[in-house]
Amino acid sequence: METSSYCPKCEINALESLLTPENILHEVEKMAYVEGVTTPSAEYERRLKVCASCSSLNGKTTCAYSGSLVAFRAKILGAGCPFPGENKWCQN
């Protein structure tokens, strides 16, 4: 009799291995630009640079305050930076 055991930790590790910064950016690049919905390329890149320099960026992918993947959040035109007390994406 063959028994297979399910290992939740193994499943989580397998999924986490797919969430590399490179894979995330690749998926975001597949998103079509939609005026009024998604961020134009130059603004998107600027937002990512702001996030990359933020002390609240975890693992090069995740915002500590929102829990969101910053590459996807930055792509949404109406999204703001969730840093407490200031929207770091606001241009000076």
Image (cartoon, rainbow, N blue to C red):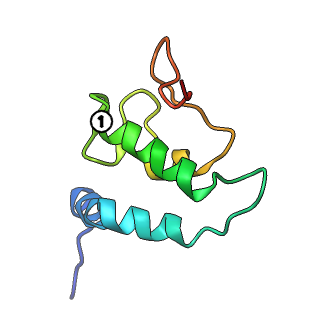
Q: Nearest the camera: 21 or 19?
A: 21
Query: What's the residue at 34%, 48% (across, down)?
Result: 61
Identify whether 66 is placed above or below 6. above
Residue at 22% from the left image edge and 79% from the top image edge: 3
Q: Is residue 19 visible?
A: no
Q: Which residue is mark 1?
A: 53
Query: Image quadrant for the N terminus?
Result: bottom left
**Residue 53 visible within the image:** yes
Is disc 1 surrounded by few (<14), some (14 to 19) or many (20+) residues within 10 Å? few
Q: Residue furthest front?
A: 92
Could you tell whether 70 is left or right of 78 in the image? left
* Residue 32 percent coordinates (x, y): 66, 69
Provide residue 56's location: percent of width, then percent of height. 31, 29
* Quarter location, residue 58: top left
Considering only vertical position in the picture, is 5 above or below 34? Answer: below
82 vs 18: above or below = above
From this view, report whether residue 39 is shown above or below residue 90.
below
Residue for point 21% across, 86% down: 2
Q: Position of residue 68 (x, y in %)?
A: 46, 41
Q: Amino acid at mark 1?
A: Ser
The picture places residue 40, in percent across and down from the top left corner, at 63, 55
31 on left or right of 83: right
User: Residue lying farthest right?
Assistant: 36
